[in-house]
Image: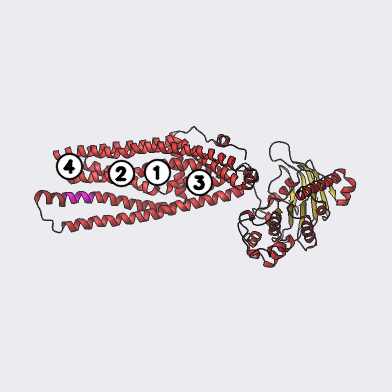
Amino acid sequence: MATTPTADLESHQPPQQVSLGSVLSGGFRLIGKFIRWHPWWFGLAVIGAAVFVSAIVASAIVIGRITDLVIIPVLDGGEAIGNKVTLAVVAIMAVAVVKAAGITLRRTAASALQYRTRADAREWLVDHQFRLGLSWHSRHSTGDLLSVSEVDTNLGTFVLAPLPYATGASLLLVATIVMVFFTSWVLGVIVLIGLSILVAIDIFGAFALFTEFEAAQYERGIVGEIAHESIDGALTVKALGREREETERFRRASDVLRDRLIGIGVRFANFRAVVEGLPAVINILVLVVGAVLVTSGPMTAGQLVSVIYLITLMAFPLQLIGFVIFEMAHSQAAWKRVQDVLDADEIVDHGALRAVSDRSGAPLDSEDVAFAYTDTEPVLSGLRLDIPAGRMVAVVGPTGSGKSTLALLLARLWDPTDGAIRLDGRDLRDFARSELPREVAFVSQETFLFDDTVWGNITLGIELDEADVLEAARLAGVERFVHDLPDGYETSIGERGTSLSGGERQRVALARALARKPRVLLLDDATSAVDPSVETEILRGLRAADLPATIVIVAYRRSSIMLTDEVVFVDEGRVVAHGTHEELLATVPGYERILRAYEEDATHRMQEEVAP
């Protein structure tokens, strides 16, 4: 948590060089992509918008005709109103009904288009992230990815809400210009020039603010990243008394985002002030020129009223078109962050092998395995391993020797940079997606539990035989504490299992793995938070149980190591020795030293815990 907002912003700074053409073409490509996802909903929304636009044009024509045929004759000639008022009211009401139907259809379909697209984008984001390797995940913060999935997805698809209306409004623009030209080419030229200026200002404004929109999205990601980190690390923050510093760190990042958004708001307001004032100028020009034309004879008063009424009704649609142009730039800036995730190509390749139905333990072997997390010194090099089926094997070695990395490779959570690891003679990379976890279960020291019940965390929504779940809970030691919980297995344990102790969480995670009856069970110090006596009891239970599993344990306690059938001693990324505990004690001096170091460390920790 030592990262500062300034440093974060420098590392996340978006590109600054963009062209007007790239902004417009990118925006239209983005809209086209969304429309292709759900063309029918877009089509329905546009039909609704077209009906609404037609009603607006019809209302202008109706108002003009009522002026010429009803109002002026009555005022000038003193004609009797008769049933003319009734006909006028019927015409106005008919137009209103059509307009209401268009609004309803447009809004319903536009909402469906936006929310369906947004849901699809989130689903694809999550699915794609699960397909990416852990190397990609290790370089991206959870907070920033949450911001992409929520904020950027929302803003990236926000343009879809007003898009159908804007499409209809564009049709209204064309209809307005055509109608005005048919009425008077002079007024048509005035309206065409005025509307062209309006659209040009909107396009220029969207281009001018694009980089600001883009920067704001990245800064939102920084704020989300810091918030997630601070909240997730609340225990550490409070334990070290760093509440004020973390609040200040969050405040600085929030202030950067606040200032950016205020700047965008001010510039946007300036553009909108110009754009929203121009229609009034156009109306005045049309009124003045139109009055001259009415006086000289080429136009009637009703025609002038129709033109002015139509331009007045155009005020909001024009604003909406401008809003969509700005939102197109905003959505493009937000969607760029979504697309960066979707374009990530560190996909874990899978083969076509299916998991076997045989529930017996499976042998594991490797050949000249090498692995490095980065391009620096390799963690594993030339590693050879041969674990027979059905055996319980301890992996032992000094800190940094590659024990946990080996466990991750055996579960294929990472792939070796060289060599191969085989299960039953089958390369782990040849398994189809989600097939290998049906044969191999991995439990790490850092357990993750969901905000669910104990039972839900063991089954994870999979239909498992109740007897198998209860047996797994018994073997993992969950049975020792679950009956003391308020609702037993149906007790909700909170986010990350906060209502359970560290040892209880590890036991639930172990039960989760055992319930699936894996052929290989990998335990990476998975019982480190459990009391030594309880850990010994669990391992003895696993050894005595009729499990269809080969068990590999990254172990640190002598009592646990002595319960295994074999020991693999790893040092400096290689298997130094492989044999029984007694054989390694007698032949490998380094093995005896590491066990003594384990015991001294455990004794030291116990003395610290009981010290007043």
Per the image, label 2 sits on a secondary structure element best described as: helix
Label 4 belongs to which residue? 299
Query: Which residue is at 71% across, 53% downward?
Result: 443
Question: Can residue 517 be seen by looking at this rendering?
Answer: yes
Q: Which quarter of the image is occupied by the N terminus? A: top right
Distance of label 4 from label 3 (alpha carbons): 53 Å
Q: Locate residue 598 relative to residue 71 in the image: left or right.
A: right
Distance of label 1 from label 2 (alpha carbons): 14 Å
Query: Which residue is at 55% across, 44% downward?
Result: 224
Observer-nearest residue: 224 or 416?
A: 224
Label 3 belongs to which residue? 151
Distance of label 4 from label 2 (alpha carbons): 23 Å
Q: Earlier in the sequence, mark 1 or mark 2?
A: 2
Distance of label 1 from label 4 (alpha carbons): 35 Å
Q: Nearer the observer, disc 4 or disc 2?
A: 2
Q: Earlier in the sequence, mark 3 or mark 1?
A: 3
Q: Locate residue 62 relative to residue 234 in the image: left or right.
A: left
Label 2 belongs to which residue? 315
Whole-percent x, y for residue 579 in the image: 85, 50
